[in-house]
Image (tube, rainbow, N blue to C red):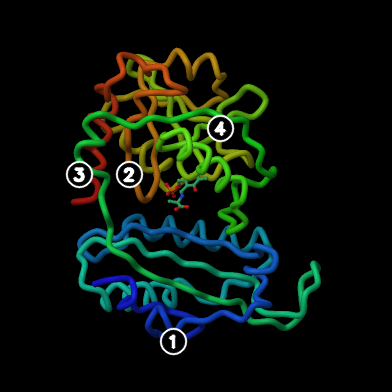
Amino acid sequence: MNDDAQTVFLNGEFLPLEQARVPVLDRGFIFGDGIYEVVPVYARKPFRWRQHLKRLGGSLQAIGITNPRDEAGWTELVHELIARHPWQDQFVYIQVTRGVARRDHAFPKDVQPTVFAMSSQFVPVADALRATGVRAISLPDERWLHCDIKSISLLGNVLARQAAVEAQAFECVMFRDGYLTEGSASNIWVVRGNTVFCPPRDRLILEGIRVGLVEELCATAGITLDIRRITREEVQAADELLLTSATREVLSITSLDGKPVGDGRPGPVYEKLYAAYQQAKAG
Ligand code: PDD
């Protein structure tokens, strides 16, 4: 199935992707005034769905948009979308904006949020890349101070990711005031021995759904987890560096700014967590 044959959901109806249109005065287009979710689907079941739904509700609440659907409504929408596509494993992308209104920064009254959802085939990270791990660069985190909201205003993330691409790297690891925050589209984990370190879940990072999951996986795999601020020096001295996201699952970063991380190969903690992740998917 090519992208043109995709069915999407827009404001109450399912329709072909090429027919889906949003008015130019949609506040998502004008102001980036909206939020989104990316949900992995395995064997046609949304993975960690409850957690994604909760974060979706939290993002909406944080920016003052009334949730346009209840839990059952979102669940029905997502299942219907999954059923309309041939793939067992998919990504569902949900986007809600404040809606369409005459241009004015302040919230308009009486507008319906725009609700959009689409699904595409889940394309796993290539085995060759898993085997070598990926390259990353580092940059100062120049985003706003509400990175905990899964906002569609992603310019800071977009510029960071582009810088990585231009440096032939896979991800950009960001630092604010000398401390690790996260990747342009992922959470970052530092490994030292058998301990995994993760920055605090504050406003400076998006709490990935995989953050809670890795916490659980560490507990079952006998890996110590330490949540605290992490300095640039600690990142540079890491035995392993990992990234997590809905699209990349758990992935090893084996080079940072052109220098090998640890021995430059995916390490034992990565191997354990990746195996545990695959088990969690199957269960
Ligand atoms: N991004 N931090 C940022 C800035 C992200 O954009 C993402 C995910 C994460 C990880 O969150 P999760 O585990 O819930 O995927 C952390 C998605 C995949 C995206 O924007 O495409």
Q: How many marks?
A: 4
Q: Measured from the top left, where is residue 208 in percent x and y?
A: 46, 46
Residue at mark 2: 249
Q: Is residue 153 above or below residue 69?
A: above
Disc 2 and disc 3 in contact, CB within 8 angstroms: no
| Amino acid under disc 4 | Met
CA gap, disc 1 to disc 2?
31 Å
Question: For mark 4, what is the residue?
Answer: 174
In the structure shown, which secondary structural element does the residue marked by tag 4 occupy? strand
User: Which of disc 3 and disc 4 is earlier in sequence?
Assistant: 4
Q: Which amino acid lies under the numbered mark 3 shown in the image of this protein?
A: Gln
User: Residue shown at 34%/38% (left/top)?
Assistant: 216
Inspect the image, locate mark 1, and give the three-letter code of the amino acid beneath it: Glu
Q: Earlier in the sequence, mark 1 or mark 3?
A: 1
How far is disc 2 from disc 4 in space, using C-alphas? 19 Å
Q: Find residue 253 and report its horizontal and vertical position in percent.
A: 36, 29
Q: Nearer the viewer, residue 57 or 270?
A: 270
Cα distance in 3D space between marks 1 and 4: 39 Å
Identified at 46% across, 62% down, the residue is 53
Q: CA distance from mark 1 to mark 3?
A: 36 Å
* First of labels 1, 4 by sequence position: 1
Left or right side of 61 for 109: right
Q: Is 47 situated above or below 207?
A: below
Pointer 2 with pointer 4, Cβ within 8 A: no
